[in-house]
Image (spheres, rainbow, N blue to C red):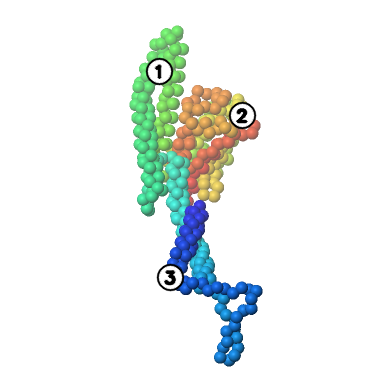
Amino acid sequence: MTTSLFAVLGCGLLLLNWLSSRDLMEANRGLVVTAPDPIVPSQTSPSPTTATPQGSSVPAATTSPSQGFDDFQHTVLSDLLLRSLLLLAVFTALAALLAWWASRRSLQRLSQVTAAARRISTGSALDERLALTGPNDEVRELADTFDAMVDRLDHSFTAQRRFTAHASHELRTPLTVQRTALEIPLAQGRVPAGLRPSIERALDANARTERLIAALLTLARGENEELTPHPVDLADTAGEALADVADEARASGTRITADLRPGPVAGDPSLLRQIALNLLTNAVRHNHPDGTATVATGTTNRLAFIEVTNTGPVLDPHEVPALFEAFQRGPECRSDGSGLGLAVARAITLTHQGQVTARPRPGGGLTVRVELPRRS
């Protein structure tokens, strides 16, 4: 576009220059042509001859000074046009090269902004900034504006997570006191028979609230944790999680098969164990009666993975992303879970620079796969 505009403007300038040169020559014709034009003999009359000392004769000159000036003007203007066209072609090529270099430089800086923005959008924290260097142009202004926006978002999210963690922590103490106050008279048999069902329902509600608060604390920790990496094998975390869900799986009739191969990673052992526990708990709770589930660990290239598959209700592919949002529960859930299992798993995975994906099984159920950087 810039080169085309330069070429059009150059052609216009060339035309104006050519017209100006022609008008200047016409205006100054009198400085060159001073004698009146001689009468040109008719073409039908015999041409006069001029004698020479040798006795020969040559035709008399028939070109007037005015015609000679016209020939001179035509030659000069033709040469001027040709040279101007050649110069225009050269400078158009230079303009195209300069425009290509400038656009490539600008697009390269925009590519840096896009790549950094993509890393920030897919990360678990908003601690990265563009910090673009170079000339103070529109791209630099865009990058600075983006950094300021990320700063505000980071402060807002950090305050929200800190509030969630503090509130959850402060609620655990009164809930523990409440549970103790209900369990002691119930255990001592000092509760009348008519009040026992109400006390038991209150204890169940208390237990659900404690589980919800524990999940919120884990979620806040997974999003906010500054990790101190330790060697962890995903096969070990999956084996521990299998032992924890064995009773619940047995009660629901869910058969779990395992293929646990070494999956070395680096991270927080308790958080990584929570990933395996949440995936297996969801596989048991979001399943058909007497359903099946499988858990596998291993490595592929530079990644280690844990994958959990379960039978269950048929899921629409469009419903799967919503399952990773907090307090979202799948259809036909047979438990009173909080709906934080996959949200917690995703938060911990992102904190460990990993990726979690889910896809529905054709016959019903879900396959969830967590991939983490392999420990070298």
The location of residue 369, given as percent across then percent down, is 54, 39
Q: What residue would you read off at disc 2?
A: 314
Callout in the foreground (1, 2): 2
* Residue in the image at 46% along x and 41% along y: 122
Q: What residue would you read off at disc 3?
A: 31
Q: How far apart, in angstroms, are the residues tagged by discs 1 and 2?
A: 41 Å
Q: How far apart, in angstroms, are the residues tagged by discs 2 and 3?
A: 99 Å
* Residue in the image at 48% along x and 36% along y: 346
Specify the quadrant of the image occupied by residue 230: top left
Specify the quadrant of the image occupied by residue 159: top left
The location of residue 248, given as percent across then percent down, is 53, 27
Badge 3 marks a residue whose secondary structure is: helix
Mark 1 residue type: Glu
Question: Looking at the image, is 201 positioned above or below residue 132?
Answer: above
Question: Looking at the image, is 276 positioned above or below residue 49?
Answer: above
Badge 2 marks a residue whose secondary structure is: loop
Q: Residues within 10 Å of mark 2 (few under 14, many from 20)?
A: some
Q: What residue would you read off at disc 1?
A: 183
Mark 2 residue type: Val
* Residue in the image at 43% along x and 30% along y: 215
